[in-house]
Image (spheres, rainbow, N blue to C red):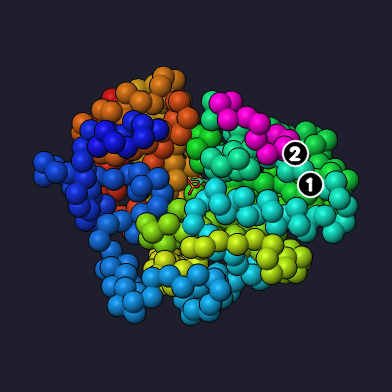
Amino acid sequence: MSALLPVYRPAEPVFVAGRGAYLIAEDGREYLDFASGIGVNALGYGDADITRAIAAAADTGLIHTSNLYRTRPAAELAAELVRLSFADAVFFCNSGAEANEAAFKFARRWARQAAQDKIEIVALNGSFHGRLFGSLAATDRPAFRAPFEPLMPGVRFVPPGDVEALRAAVSRERTAAIIAEPVQGEGGVRPLEAEYVRALREAADEADALLIFDEVQCGLGRTGHLFAYEEAGVAPDLLTLAKPLAGGLPMGAVLLSARVASAIQPGDHATTFGGGPFVASVARAVLRRISDPDFLADVRRKGQRIQAALTALVGRGGVEEARGRGMMWGLQLATPAAPVISRALEAGLLVISAGERVVRLLPPLSIADADLERGLEILAEVLA
Ligand SMILES: *Cc1c(COP(=O)(O)O)cnc(C)c1O
């Protein structure tokens, strides 16, 4: 594997198969997966609906057509996302970063109708929106940014929770959009207070700017609601999705309200692969499962179980705080997370970090109760 560009430091096991909430390594060892491919494998491994959707989509022979031609799966998936959300239109792409970059372009296109200089994006400290030049410009991680500057200009950061700072940063003349993750993921699993989410909406409205929610990680059932914004009762103008959308196949999406969609003209943006019939068919199957109210109720129930188990760990083994929503949780440690993650791996449990001192848990939403309990037990033992 040494021919792979070393931008990652992957863990030792070489995985060859997956089943339910387990990954199976070359040596036959099974690992309980509380990382889900960074929140992608919401339905675990080997899910029958996904396997069936893949087989059926492959059987048509129609993997790709380009967006110069019409196909049914993307149109149906878009219609379903519209039906289930605040949105009136959907743009498909291939990743989270791409979705955010598209959202920035759409926001600028919309805002420029009012004034040529209305181009700024206001983002939050602790944010993560992707690794491309635009999405990275809105990502508050000096180490990710510094080697690649200059990034896209026109981004201002404000500390989450500080309404005064937000009001000072947002302006009618300059601001095109505010972007926020309702639950910050990479920044340490930090849910925004509902009150602050409402303040974001108000600040955007007062400045005639757009509100973008990046739900690439916290959306699509992860919080126990189909969309994280539902819990705060605040709808955005643009919403970005990716990670779990197509069951592990690469797909991103931007959901747009009618007023933003109406500013976009043919030719304003494009993608060769985005919304292809193969990935869209699989995403349709994933969305059908995740949007089922019983499925979401089950995520909330399992989320409460995780919350109880993690809250019981606070004050032990250097655990300072447990934060999260639904089945997206972070344990804030007094010490680096890496040794805990290594010990968990040795004990057969996959967990990941979110920043230096946070252990992040993103189990498959479909995980069986017994597997969830087993993983929480391993974690408690590892931290003891
Ligand atoms: C992962 C992530 C992204 C970037 O997604 P990629 O598919 O890796 O480009 C953007 N925003 C959030 C909140 C994410 O968690």
Query: What distance separates the C-alpha of mark 1 from that of mark 2?
Result: 7 Å
Within 8 Å of ligand 1, the CB of disc 1? no
In depth, the one of 51 and 166 nearer the eye is: 51
Amino acid type of the residue that numbered disc 1 sits on in the rendered structure: Ile
Going from N to C along the chain, the mark reached first, 1 or 2, is 1
Residue with the mark numbered 1: 119
Q: Quadrant of residue 341?
A: top left
As helix, strand or loop, the secondary structure at mark 1 comes to loop
Residue with the mark numbered 2: 154
Q: Is residue 152 magenta?
A: yes
Q: Is residue 76 magenta?
A: no
Within 8 Å of ligand 1, the CB of disc 2? no
For the residues bearing labels 1 and 2, Cβ distance under 8 angstroms: yes
**Left or right of residue 119, residue 283 in this image:** left
Residue 333 higher or lower than 55, as above or below: above
Amino acid type of the residue that numbered disc 2 sits on in the rendered structure: Gly
Taking the spot 35% from the left edge, 44% from the top edge, the residue there is 35
Taking the spot 46% from the left edge, 73% from the top edge, the residue there is 65
Taking the spot 62% from the left edge, 50% from the top edge, the residue there is 101
In depth, the one of 61 and 129 nearer the eye is: 61
In depth, the one of 332 and 100 nearer the eye is: 100
Start and end of the magenta stretch? 146-157
Q: Is residue 261 visible?
A: no
Within 10 Å of disc 1 (Cα), the crowding (few <14, some 14-19, many 20+) is many
As helix, strand or loop, the secondary structure at mark 2 comes to loop
Residue 159: percent from left, percent from top: 68, 32
